[in-house]
Amino acid sequence: MLAAVRTLSRTELVTETLRAALEQLTLADEEWLAPLILPDWTERYGRPAFYHRLPKGKAALEEYALRVGEDGIRLLTAACHGDAPPRLRALPQVQLLRQVWVQQYWHDGAGLLRWRGPKSTKDRLSRRKMPRRAALHPETDGQPDPATACVPWASIEIVSPYDPQVRYSQKLTAAGKKDWIGYRDHQTETCDGSGPNVIVQVLTQPAPEQDIDALDAIHQGLARQGFTGLEHFVDAEYVTPESIDQAARTHGFVLTGPVRADPRRVSIPASRRRTSHPTGKPAPSPAPAK
């Protein structure tokens, strides 16, 4: 289910988040905010952030993002100061500004504001034994390297200041990879053939949450509605041996659906397959044809 928001780059996100906080603070207490405004803020936050208005080039774009970060720190510091009215720091957009800044920025050991790296640079302990990575951070002793601080995973990363609950997700389908920003919608309808099919339940979950993780909540909702002891037809994403067993034991549902292919299965070419005698010894290779 798509969210009614514009897809933002990370630089657009922080700019729009700060702009939204400034607009809310202006309405709440314009006199308190006025002394904090810097001369270049009107140009930077006076209109929506679009990619064609941002600096071009990786270095210039990162410099711009750090400037926005410093502006946000200035605003948050003032709003959280003891002399500031407590109601200002409690404003939803100010709280959202704090959360987005935690996710997108960090301070290094020297106290300098830094722009977090993308998810693909995340330093994992499981990758340390790989020869290409093992020599990169020997001083960290297996701990995540602070220099590779990156943005959080999609399950918690805020991607829009105008709908903080939406998340980015992607899914592999027969037609290829699909990605979207929004939610994941699960609908259950009747299919007994005695009348029109009726949707009896709709469950909305965060977009990155897998279908199989929503199955128990779906069954709990159906049980509360009196739908028990029935056959439940589902897609392959909901079917595992565990989900079939739990549906039957906990809620009395007969879970029916296609079985997913095991991604761990490795296909062995016919030329490399070997059979065994009853003794357990490998069968001799067939003699070449003459």
Image (tube, rainbow, N blue to C red):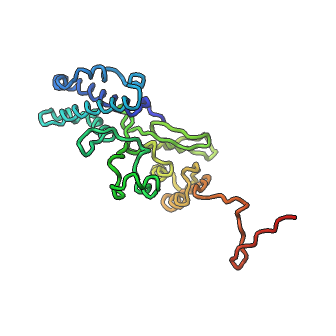
- Residue sitting at 27 percent across and 42 percent down? 107
The residue nearer to you, when weighing 236 against 72, is 72
The quadrant in which residue 271 appears is bottom right
* Image spot of residue 167 (x, y percent): 42, 39
Instruction: Please state if 264 lies on the left or on the right of 92 as rendered.
Output: right
The quadrant in which residue 31 appears is top left
The residue nearer to you, when weighing 177 against 203, is 177
* Image spot of residue 155 (x, y percent): 41, 45
Q: Residue furthest right?
A: 290
- Residue sitting at 53 percent across and 61 percent down? 245
Q: Residue furthest front?
A: 135
* Image spot of residue 171 (x, y percent): 53, 43
Residue 4 visible in the shown view: no
Residue 47 visible in the shown view: yes
The residue nearer to you, when weighing 177 against 62, is 62
* Image spot of residue 267 (x, y percent): 65, 58
Q: Work out whether 182 lies above or below 35.
A: below
Instruction: Please state if 170 lies on the left or on the right of 5 as rendered.
Output: right
Total number of numbered discs in the rendering: 0
Instruction: Please state if 27 lies on the left or on the right of 238 as rendered.
Output: left
Q: Work out whether 241 lies above or below 149.
A: below
Q: Residue furthest bottom?
A: 279
- Residue sitting at 45 percent across and 37 percent down? 182
Instruction: Identify the image quadrant of the C terminus.
Output: bottom right
